[in-house]
Amino acid sequence: MTAVDRSPTDDAVVRMRDAATRVGGRQIWSAVDLTIRPAEFVAVLGPNGAGKSTLLRSILGLQPVSTGTVQVLGAPAGQQNARIGYLPQRRAFDQSVRIRGIDLVRLGWDGDRWGFPLPGFLAGRRGRLAAERVAEVISLVGAESYAHRPIGQCSGGEQQRLLIAQALVRRPELLILDEPLDSLDVPNQSAVSALIQQVCRSENVAVLLVAHDVNPIYPYLDTVAYLAHGSVVAGPPEQVITAETLSMLYDTPIEVLRDRAGRLVVVGQPDSHADHRP
Amino acid sequence: MTAHLTLNLLADVRQLLSYHFMLNALRAGTVVAVVSGAIGYFMVLRRQSFAGHTLAVVGFPGAAGAAWLGLAPSLGYFGFCLAAALLIAALPGGGRAAGGAGEESAAIGTLQGFALACGFLFVSLSQGFLSGLTSLLFGSITGITDNQVLVLLGSGLVSLLLLAVLGRPLLFASVDQDVARARGLRVRLLSAAFLLLLGVAVAGTSQVTGSLLVFALLVAPAATASRLTARPAVGLPLSIGIALLVTWLGEAIAFYSPYQIGFWVTSLAFAAFLLASGYQALADRRFRSDHRSQPAAAPLAEPVRR
């Protein structure tokens, strides 16, 4: 069920058609249509247990759909994962992790290749190319001043920027971020959201981000995919986060209110646990 | 011991090398220091010291049992350590980096006690040479045979070769397991392979430092190196270097003193660790005072809503 339909284009990064999935015999969502175009910034929103992470997993090919199709970068989901940068939901690195941010970014480049990490002066041409790209993404996320510190000594916002750099280092065409704002304070949530939009434009990479709260990302988004009640509505945020659309999706009256700071509050979802608290 | 320390360093070293048992001790120590310095670096990074300690304790009944049955002690060390490594890898979540918490650690702790008891029984059964018992537990520079050196060299070369091939993916899976798995790395298999490497390192080190003091070479140099640098490409060679230095010095001092090698190697390693910890505390303080002008790092993360 798609309230705001997009005309399908051939260069779509993700195209889900009438997709449905079951986990442990329970229908998570069905009739999901979702198209993500190159360099589009998409957020997946919805109450807890609506299947947001399952949606990401099905796009990564880790969770097969029971009906419908999921095409990613022109192939069935799971076949083009090398062209996807994925940042799983995680806890932060603690103080005792003695490895530098720049090493972590570098592992994103060639950490899955057999062999041994060599010091810079022994690395040869391939090593220099890698080092150049690593320096490039680190400056892209603005992490130059702390990339050489042990990651455990970086703040939550700094760690998140370095992890985004790690996900970007191989020039992916799709960036999948599972709750990247989860453990950040409010100023850092906005700063990282702005950074993601900037990356999306400058690196020409489509971004699919799962979030609890629409407010920090609202100004930067192209598309919201709102997952609730077993289905999804996708479209521009100002058309999706409305009383009309959400009431239709939930099939029950929903209010979308703005508080004095201009933050959106969704009221009246039957099965949510106040997921749009500011 | 008939050796006398003179003020002539060259003469001292020549005297030390004139004994065949001392040559063997140095050969074995060198191999063991390189292997445990390298593998220990990953163990510290993966926070699997508990698994390492378990393997060491399990090696003791292996060696004591081999002595009782009249077999080579190497056979007992390697057999038991590798079998225990496979067992830990097979435990649910046992091979995970930073693993070994909760229920599992209770089970493994129980196993450790049982292993020590069995080792003691085997020593008693083989007419209980008390010196045999102490050298099994705390190491000895005498009595390392030519064969033992060859076995150590062979196993050391194989495990270093394997580590050289696995190095980068192992590092990735050790510090960033989820992303490594998403990249298609077989994290579980890597963990099992690492535990086997750890088994080899522990079995080898036990033959020099004794079962209870393997951490002098397996943990202390790696922990020291990681306090001095957060760069893997520097930390790993540094860890090996510290292990070598501590081993050579410890063996030389043990040769000229009435006390056993295990004590000296452990004390030197501990001193290096203390120095490095002091250095890190100073560096941290300097870093904090440099960044005082900036806003403080984010406080505790907000409660996760789930």
Image (tube, coloured by chain):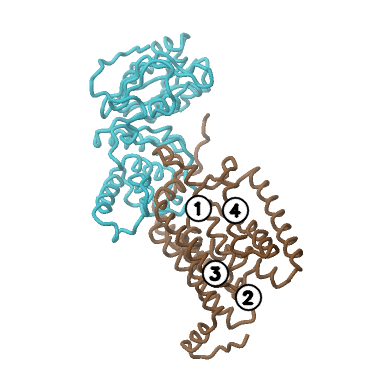
Chain colours: A cyan, B brown
Q: Position of residue A236 (x, y in %)?
A: 31, 19
- Look at the numbered disc 4 and give the secondary structure of its residue: helix
Residue A237: x and y in percent read 34, 21
Discs 1 and 3 share one subunit: no
Say which residue label 4 marks: B50
Q: Chain of mark 1?
A: A
Residue A169 lies left or right of residue B287; in this view the side is left
Report the disc number at residue B147. Answer: 3
Amino acid type assigned to the residue bearing label 1 in the image: Ser
Looking at the rendered structure, the kind of residue marked 3 is: Asn
The mark lying in front, picked from 2 and 4, is: 2
Identify residue type, mark 2. Answer: Gln
Amino acid type assigned to the residue bearing label 4 in the image: Phe
> Circle 2 sits on which residue?
B260
The residue wearing badge 1 is A96
Report if the CB atoms under discs 2 and 4 are less than 8 Å apart.
no
Left or right position of B157 against A217: right
